[in-house]
């Protein structure tokens, strides 16, 4: 089984306004792909479906060989903690917790042996350039917080990292450095990467670009994508 993720005959909608329909989409283990499309085209929706944070109307979503689409909430949590690393535009870090504890929580959620939590978290943060692992993340810069978020996403060596506009809150230089960091970290962790971005400049970084517009069937959405072209 070489797929990190596989979607088949997937249908999802937010009522009449927006619908996604995907006959087949798969990403191999270790593969890196960009989900490209303008604002409102459905990039986040696709990532949330894969993460089990949204439920499809029909079809199957398999993550690391496990069915996410019909998993119970607790089973979806387990698949997410073990196999998926999430990096979102807003980091969803716990601001009063230290960098080390934010990363250690991911290890705890995945059921990794407790005695390794502190050292694994600290070592990975150091490797990603964060030395001050014991200060609350609220006291770190935005760029440093992004590094902590990347550390949290890859510490469990996930099958796949889902990154949603990971550089949107950073300036151009920091955005480029953050993408280097994410891609390098995924490569070293052996994780596939599915990254959503409206920024066309990102396309050159990826061996594969998936246009989300091609999955959108609603009249409103195709008008929108036509207007953007
Ligand atoms: P993107 O990430 O590409 O900007 P999204 O996946 O967030 O796009 O949204 C796709 C479309 O679905 C947009 O038209 C958006 O307005 C709509 N949408 C997003 N979330 C919801 C929701 N919870 N309820 C209804 N419509 C939504
Ligand atoms: Mg989005």
Image (cartoon, rainbow, N blue to C red):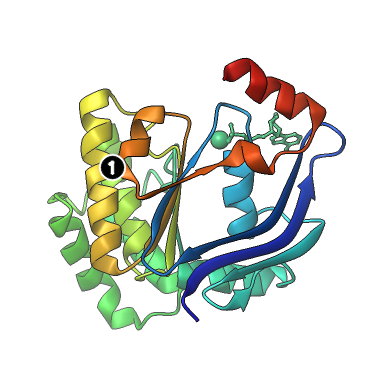
Q: How crowded is the residue under tag 1: few (<14 C-alpha within 10 Å), some, or many (20+)?
A: some
Res. 118 in view: yes
Q: Residue furthest right?
A: 16
Nearer to us in this view, 221 or 63: 221
* Spot occupied by residue 54 in the image (x, y as percentages of width and height): 69, 53
Q: Secondary structure at mark 1?
A: helix
Dot 1 corresponds to which residue? 179
* Spot occupied by residue 199 in the image (x, y as percentages of width and height): 41, 28
In this view, 48 is above or below 91: below
Nearer to us in this view, 42 or 78: 42
**Left or right: residue 139 compared with residue 227:** left
* Spot occupied by residue 154 in the image (x, y as percentages of width and height): 34, 62
**Left or right: residue 94 compared with residue 183:** right
Q: Tell me what residue is drawn at x 59 percent, y 68 percent.
A: 77
Q: Quadrant of residue 51?
A: bottom right
**Left or right: residue 211 compared with residue 194:** right
Nearer to us in this view, 222 or 59: 222
Q: Residue furthest top?
A: 227
Res. 98 in view: no
In this view, 113 is above or below 209: below
Q: Quadrant of ligand 1?
A: top right
* Spot occupied by residue 160 in the image (x, y as percentages of width and height): 44, 63
Number of numbered discs: 1
Q: Tell me what residue is drawn at x 38 percent, y 80 percent.
A: 112
Q: Which quadrant holds the C terminus? A: top right
């Amino acid at each position: 089984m070489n797929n990190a993720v596989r979607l088949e005959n997937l249908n999802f909608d937010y009522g009449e306004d927006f619908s996604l329909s995907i006959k087949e989409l798969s990403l191999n283990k270790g593969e890196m792909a960009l989900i490209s499309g303008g604002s409102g085209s459905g990039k986040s929706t696709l990532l949330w479906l894969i993460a089990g944070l949204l439920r499809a109307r029909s079809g199957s979503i398999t993550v690391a060989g496990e069915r996410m689409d019909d998993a119970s909430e607790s089973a979806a949590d387990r698949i997410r903690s073990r196999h998926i690393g999430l990096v979102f535009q807003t980091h969803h870090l716990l601001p009063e917790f230290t960098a080390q504890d934010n990363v250690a929580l991911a290890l705890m959620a995945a059921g990794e042996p407790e005695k390794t939590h502190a050292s694994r978290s600290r070592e990975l943060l150091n490797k990603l350039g964060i030395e001050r692992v014991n200060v609350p993340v609220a006291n770190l810069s935005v760029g440093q917080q992004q590094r902590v978020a990347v550390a949290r996403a890859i510490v469990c060596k996930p099958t796949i990292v889902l990154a949603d506009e990971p550089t949107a809150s950073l300036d151009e230089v920091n955005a480029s450095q953050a993408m280097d960091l994410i891609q390098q970290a995924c490569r070293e962790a052996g994780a596939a990467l599915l990254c959503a971005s409206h920024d066309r400049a990102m396309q050159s970084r990826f061996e594969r670009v998936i246009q989300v517009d091609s999955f959108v069937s609603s009249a409103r959405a195709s008008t929108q994508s036509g207007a953007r072209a």
